[in-house]
Image (cartoon, rainbow, N blue to C red):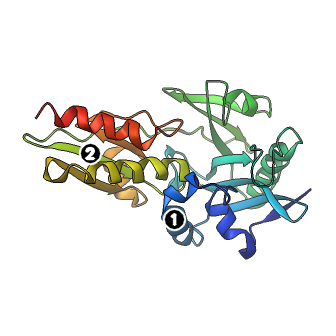
Amino acid sequence: MEITDLQEEFVNTFCCCLEDWSDEMMEAGSHKAHWFQQMRDQGLRVKLAVEDGNACGMIQYVPVELSMVHGEDLYFVLCVWVHGYKEGIGNRQKKGMGTALLRAAETDVREMGKKGIAVWGVSMPFWMKASWFRNHGYRKVDKNGSAVLLWKSFTVNAQPPHWIREVRRPQPVAGKVTVSGFINGWCPARNIVFERAKRAAQEFGDAVEFKEIYTNDRDVFLDWGISDGVFIDGKQVNSGPPPSYEKIRKKIAKRVRKL
């Protein structure tokens, strides 16, 4: 297993979160590819764990000023992922790839002269567990629902980051059902939810208005304080794990019947 920077041959695989075999991942559209092209010249860093000629794990991290948290002179890890399915290249977890990727990112950020690195994890025992980061020396500094913000400082004068919280959310419009999709582009799973909601909203014709809100524009993100998410008449749809198209359509239909 080798940790490398992202090479051109693996860009498409990276944009599919290593799941280019997955039909579901195809529902995510081209949002991740567009995000990557925009961010690659703004400080985005990507490292891969390569084994047997396959990209088996990945970590992506950005300057904190382009992330979902407030901070200064830090980098922020958007995700660490090691392929965990039987399909495709098979389950590569529990082999130390995640740890190796995180250590490589820390070394990279130190060498750039940054003051520290921030990460986020989930308080529940599944993907991106906050406890995993704590076991690697990260300290909790903030929490927003089930999302836990942690960090590791490299200098004595580093200041801890904190979450950028929701400022406002879409409001219902009289006489219509309003479906609002917020999308940053970095996460295919969240992009899938956006695309499913958009497709479902279109089935109801003029009764439903779908609003697209692209939060990779920093000013737009700060105006709302929402990076990704789908709202139906101002009520947020639970997006983890991604709800099915049928479930989203059912939620919209329920609101349409009340018009």
171 relative position to 41: left or right? left
67 relative position to 62: left or right? left
Disc 2 crowd rating (10 Å Cα; few below 14, some 14-19, many 20+) is many
**Residue closer to the observer: 79 or 220:** 79
**Residue closer to the observer: 143 or 55:** 55
Spatial separation of the CA atoms under disc 1 and disc 2: 23 Å
The secondary structure type at the circle numbered 1 is: helix
Image coordinates of residue 247 in percent, x first then y, are 39, 36
Up-down relation of residue 83 to residue 144 (above or below): below
Up-down relation of residue 259 to residue 92 (above or below): above
Q: Quick one: label 1 or label 2, which is nearer the N terminus?
A: 1
Residue 51 in view of the camera: yes
Q: Residue at x 48, y 51 (%)?
A: 192
The amino acid type, in three-letter code, at marker 1 is Trp
Up-down relation of residue 74 to residue 11 (above or below): above
**Residue closer to the observer: 257 or 214:** 257
The secondary structure type at the circle numbered 2 is: strand
Q: Residue at x 44, y 46 (%)?
A: 193
- Give the labeled residue for mark 1: 35
The amino acid type, in three-letter code, at marker 2 is Val
Image coordinates of residue 213 in percent, x first then y, are 32, 55
